[in-house]
């Protein structure tokens, strides 16, 4: 059983309603046992016994790209929270509210690269909050907003009750154009329960949905596409290819996920990565897995380039090791 | 297994074979892991030899890259191979470039 503290990262553009969503949850009895990390006290507005403040501090490591920057503030705040969880007890999850312009990728990279944090914290979900009034405009004009949605596994719509709210179908289409398999929930729905997104029972590495229609590709913009794969994938060849691809182009690959039947295992695998960081594969039973496929959410890389590269790699590398 | 360090050689990186069995210490299947690891090193060499580098297993746990001048660098995981290879060879690793996965005979034909 995984006894690590579940972490839910709540991201979303300025004014989208992140704080309101978190407050709605922690003020219920089932959310009271949450530790919260915020970048700005004013922004959280939560009177909560388990509140940790983290001034946004980003450290670039090895002269690397920004997506691999270490969020020193996040690392320290999570260390503090885990210690509090161990000493105070009765503490079931950590919720991290990023600032409105923050990129969630460095938070995930920080978690994946810190051995102590990896042993104590499990990334349960990245939730992007999109408001029904300004959300479409933000997604069209602000690259930060697109990155937040692209990396999230769950999107919560807010402010759908306001007069200026855009129709839900238009909002969903704008979100799906960036992240085709995101789980989309409306906080105004009568059945919406904040614990379903902030409860920490989800797994960020859950298998993605198969065979979604490709979102339109725009030059130098976020595009998503699915690559179906035939038969069993040669795992050593696939890992050589994907590791090289993420090394060279991880800054432009916001998400890669997929379901693979491999030559190395009887069980199908779900794989998940955010930019340069891959998470350990999760194992599925044969019954719950369909055909193999990969989903990419990338900026400025076309499906044809990835498809051609993977095809060449699998042919060449399999031949080289025969 | 390395008897000095008690390293089992299955690895914890996402690409390593222990991850294929969801177990840290895959005692039952170690020969399979060794065979897969050997195949992966053959694949790496298909890409690294044209860059003037040779990849060898380093105790079943890491990878050692050596250039023609005898300089050796250790890559603890598969992900570390690429920056190490670029540092030693001065070449850029780009799997989206057609030449990167071209078999050497195909490259020769193109050149010639």
Image (cartoon, coloured by chain):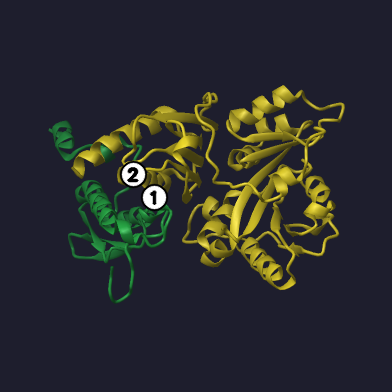
Q: Secondary structure at mark 1?
A: helix
Instruction: From the image, tell me which residue sits under label 1.
Output: B20
Front one among A10 and B49 = A10
Does residue A96 appear anywhere in the picture? yes
With respect to residue A41, does A207 lie above or below? above
Q: Identify which residue is drawn at 50% across, 27% down.
A: A211
Image colour for chain A is: yellow
Where's the C terminus of chain A, which quadrant? top left
Q: CA distance from mark 2 to mark 1?
A: 9 Å
Chain coloured green in this rendering = B
Front one among A82 and A10 = A82
Does residue A26 appear anywhere in the picture? no
With respect to residue B85, does B69 lie above or below? below
Quarter-wise, where is residue A168 in the image? top right
Instruction: From the image, tell me which residue sits under label 2.
Output: A235
Dot 2 alpha-carbon crowd within 10 angstroms: few under 14, some 14 to 19, many 20 or more: many
Residue A2: x, y in percent? 57, 58
Front one among A165 and A155 = A155
Quarter-wise, where is residue B70 in the image? bottom left
Is A311 positioned to the left or the right of A71 in the image?
A: left
Front one among A58 and A271 = A271
Q: Identify which residue is drawn at 33% across, 66% down.
A: B8
Mark 2 and mark 1 in contact? Answer it, CB < 8 Å: yes
Residue A254: x, y in percent? 53, 41
Quarter-wise, where is residue A216 in the image? top right
Residue B35: x, y in percent? 24, 53
For residue A21, which numbered disc appears in the image? none
């Amino acid at each position: 059983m995984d006894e690590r503290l579940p972490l839910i990262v709540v991201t979303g553009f300025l004014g989208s309603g992140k704080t309101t969503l978190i407050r709605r949850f922690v003020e219920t009895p089932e959310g009271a046992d949450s530790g919260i990390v915020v970048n700005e006290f004013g922004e959280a507005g939560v009177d909560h016994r388990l509140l940790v403040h983290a001034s946004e501090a980003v450290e670039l490591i090895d002269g690397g790209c920004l997506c691999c920057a270490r969020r020193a503030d996040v690392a320290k705040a999570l260390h503090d929270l885990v210690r509090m969880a161990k000493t105070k007890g009765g503490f079931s999850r950590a919720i991290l509210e990023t600032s409105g312009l923050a990129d969630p990728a460095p938070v995930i990279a920080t978690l994946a690269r810190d051995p102590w944090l990896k042993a104590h914290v499990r990334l349960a979900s990245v939730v992007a909050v999109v408001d029904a009034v300004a959300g479409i405009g933000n997604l069209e004009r602000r690259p930060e907003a697109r990155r937040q949605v692209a990396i999230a596994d769950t999107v919560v719509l807010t402010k759908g009750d306001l007069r200026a709210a855009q129709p839900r179908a238009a909002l969903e289409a704008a979100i799906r154009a960036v992240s085709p398999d995101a789980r989309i929930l409306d906080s105004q729905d009568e059945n919406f329960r904040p614990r379903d997104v902030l409860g920490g029972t989800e797994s960020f590495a859950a298998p993605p949905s198969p065979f979604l229609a490709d979102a339109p590709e725009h030059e130098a913009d976020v595009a998503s596409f699915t690559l179906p794969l035939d038969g069993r994938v040669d795992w050593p060849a696939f890992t050589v290819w994907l590791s090289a691809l993420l090394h060279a182009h991880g800054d432009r690959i916001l998400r890669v996920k997929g379901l693979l039947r491999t030559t190395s295992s009887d069980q199908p695998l779900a794989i998940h990565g955010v930019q340069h960081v891959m998470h350990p594969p999760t194992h599925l039973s044969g019954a719950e897995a369909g055909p193999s496929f990969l989903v990419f959410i990338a900026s400025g890389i076309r499906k044809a380039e990835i498809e051609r590269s993977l095809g060449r790699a699998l042919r060449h590398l399999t031949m080289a090791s025969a | 297994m390395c008897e000095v360090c008690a390293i089992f050689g299955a690895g914890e990186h996402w690409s390593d074979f222990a991850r294929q069995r969801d177990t840290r210490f895959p005692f039952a299947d170690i020969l399979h892991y060794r065979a897969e690891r050997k195949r992966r090193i053959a694949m790496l060499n298909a890409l690294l030899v044209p860059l003037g580098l040779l990849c060898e297993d380093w105790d079943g746990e890491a990878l050692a890259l050596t250039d023609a001048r005898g300089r050796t660098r250790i890559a603890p995981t598969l992900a570390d191979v690429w920056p190490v290879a670029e540092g030693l060879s001065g070449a850029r690793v780009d799997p989206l470039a057609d030449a990167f996965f071209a078999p050497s005979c195909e490259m020769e034909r193109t050149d010639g």
